[in-house]
């Protein structure tokens, strides 16, 4: 990656970096125009759940393109939208029965916030508007979603444009914000929601939003058993909607259709999922309850919202083909089984002093790096440790998803590993070997 930055008219993410040009994808591999092969070990940013180049998905998309690619959601429904909504509600926890389709994760997060707000107004609670979220979280980059995202680094530039919303402490067992060890945990991190609702005034709080397993900001943070059950109880006690952001975890990523199922909790809304389009087409959704739907139906009658690609037929046909493929190949179970294998293999990384924590659930794993394993002191952000590891892995043909700021909003380094569900055990071993090598090389370069 020592080449000069790309000199063309594209406004890239990092303006001082060279990007290879991707040409082809097959299975877990991507190939650039120079013929180099990469294991897509994170499905980009936890998107390509089925791998690349699936003919079945291509065929379903071409069929839909041959029928109709676009019709506006204010004028038509479509057979794929109807069937997809039926499938998703059958997959979701019982009682979630209505689906609103969208074309981006941030768009879906903001849709859930607005749906919650309109629900509150339409059922006669117009004072309820606040949405509480958590620190060390990510809900998207548009300004409304960024307001909920608890990540200082992403917020800093845009702070004056972001509305203030309340945040509670994260369920971050490796760095417990309540100073507990797992043995002495009393779930005070969940109780922080209750305290915050009381401080803010229960009559003003519309919803609480959280990722069931935190992804981009902290690297696969799995909450302790009982956490989401306690959160649900608190939400019920104060008449607050529970919205789970499953943009990364939804559709099988953690070994369940939805991650929240691990704890038997029924949310009021699920925001999902990159894995729904699996990289073949942008398609996201909000799945909600009959109660929310009814309040809006009997209230205004219109959900005062909408985007150009809401309920898009091509998007819905693509997602249907993705769900069919998952079902036919039993891939949610594969995610659970191969995820356990991956987590087991990743334990080898503890041989590097800079590896502080290896964690995850299903095919959703994170490795957190520390300067001092005993004190858990993070590296200074200027060392760009997550970028060093991921760039070295990239050079050696492995894509992982780097992140920083998990420890306190600014400090902290991790990488996310979230390969396609079709990965084999042998390919997992190769993935881990390349990552192991990249971490070793990083550690030597930091001495
Ligand atoms: C949990 C979560 N919510 C929302 C988003 C935003 O999705 P998008 O980038 O499609 O706007 C992301 C993206 O990584 C995410 O991980």
Image (cartoon, rainbow, N blue to C red):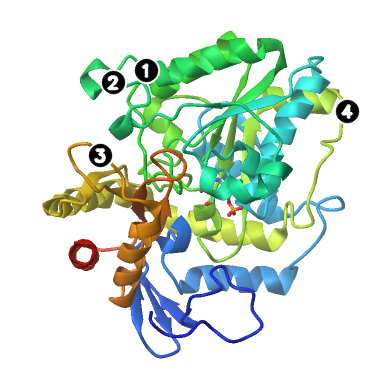
Kindly indicate whether the residue at mark 2 contacts the one at mark 3 (C-beta within 8 angstroms): no
Q: Is residue 31 above or below residue 238?
A: below
- Res 300 label: 4
Sequence-wise, the earlier of marks 1 and 4 is: 1
Question: Alpha-carbon distance for marks 4 and 2?
Answer: 47 Å
Sequence-wise, the earlier of marks 3 and 4 is: 4
Which residue, given by chain and number where applicable, does mark 2 sit on? 180
Judged by depth in the image, the label closer to the viewer, 4 or 2, is 2
**Residue at 69% from the left image edge and 46% from the top image edge:** 143
Which secondary structure lies at badge 2? Answer: loop
Residue 348 visible? The answer is yes
**How would you rate the neighbour count of disc 2 (Cα within 10 Å): few for under 14, some for 14-19, many for 20 or more?**
some
Question: Alpha-carbon distance for marks 3 and 2?
Answer: 14 Å
Q: Is residue 190 above or below residue 167?
A: above
Judged by depth in the image, the label closer to the viewer, 3 or 2, is 3
Residue 330 visible? The answer is no
Sequence-wise, the earlier of marks 1 and 2 is: 2
Which residue, given by chain and number where applicable, does mark 1 sit on? 187
Tell me: is circle 4 under 8 Å from ligand 1: no
Classify residue 345 by image quadrant: bottom left
In the picture provided, is 48 more to the left or to the right than 66? Answer: left
Which image quarter holds the N terminus? Answer: bottom left
Residue 402 location (% of width, % of height): 39, 58
Kindly indicate whether the residue at mark 1 contacts the one at mark 3 (C-beta within 8 angstroms): no
Residue 44 location (% of width, % of height): 45, 64
Kindly indicate whether the residue at mark 2 contacts the one at mark 1 (C-beta within 8 angstroms): no
Which residue, given by chain and number where applicable, does mark 3 sit on? 376
Sequence-wise, the earlier of marks 4 and 2 is: 2
Which secondary structure lies at badge 1? Answer: loop
Nearest the viewer among 70 and 113 is: 113
């Amino acid at each position: 990656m020592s080449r000069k930055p790309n000199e063309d008219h594209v406004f890239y993410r990092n303006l001082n970096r060279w990007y290879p040009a991707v040409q082809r994808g097959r299975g877990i591999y991507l190939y650039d125009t120079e013929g180099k092969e990469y294991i897509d070990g994170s499905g980009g940013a936890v998107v390509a759940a089925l791998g690349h180049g699936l003919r079945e998905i291509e065929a379903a998309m071409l069929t839909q393109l041959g029928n109709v690619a676009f019709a506006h959601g204010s004028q038509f429904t479509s057979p794929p939208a109807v069937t997809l909504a039926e499938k998703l509600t059958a997959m979701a926890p019982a009682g979630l029965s209505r689906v609103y389709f969208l074309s981006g994760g941030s768009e879906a997060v903001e849709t859930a916030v607005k749906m919650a707000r309109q629900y509150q107004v339409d059922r006669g609670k117009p004072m309820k508007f606040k949405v509480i979220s958590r620190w060390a979280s990510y809900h998207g980059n548009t300004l409304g979603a960024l307001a909920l995202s608890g990540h200082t680094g992403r917020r800093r530039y845009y702070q004056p444009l972001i509305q203030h919303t309340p945040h509670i402490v994260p369920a971050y067992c490796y760095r417990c914000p309540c100073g507990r060890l797992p043995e002495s945990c009393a779930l005070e991190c969940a109780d922080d929601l209750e305290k915050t609702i009381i401080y803010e005034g229960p009559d003003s709080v519309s919803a609480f939003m959280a990722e069931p397993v935190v992804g981009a900001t902290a690297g696969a943070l799995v909450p302790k058993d009982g956490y989401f059950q306690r959160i649900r109880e608190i939400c019920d006690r104060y008449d607050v909607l529970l919205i789970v952001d499953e943009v990364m975890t939804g559709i099988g990523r953690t070994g369940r259709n939805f991650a929240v199922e691990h704890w038997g909790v029924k949310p009021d809304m699920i925001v999902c999922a990159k894995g729904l389009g699996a990289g073949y087409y942008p398609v996201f959704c909000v799945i909600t309850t009959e109660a929310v739907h009814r309040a809006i139906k009997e209230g205004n009658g219109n959900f005062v919202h909408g985007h150009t690609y809401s309920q898009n037929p091509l998007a819905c046909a693509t997602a249907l083909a993705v769900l069919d493929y998952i079902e036919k190949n039993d891939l949610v179970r594969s995610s659970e089984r191969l995820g356990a294998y991956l987590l087991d293999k990743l334990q080898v990384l503890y041989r590097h002093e800079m590896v502080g924590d290896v964690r995850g659930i299903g095919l959703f794993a994170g490795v957190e790096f520390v300067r001092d394993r005993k004190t858990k002191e993070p590296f200074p952000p200027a060392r760009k440790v997550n970028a060093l590891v991921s760039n070295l892995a990239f050079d050696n043909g492995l894509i992982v998803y780097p992140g920083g700021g998990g420890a306190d909003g600014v400090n902290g380094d991790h990488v996310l590993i979230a390969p396609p569900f079709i990965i084999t055990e042998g390919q997992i071993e190769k993935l881990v070997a390349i990552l192991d090598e990249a971490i070793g090389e990083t550690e030597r370069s930091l001495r």
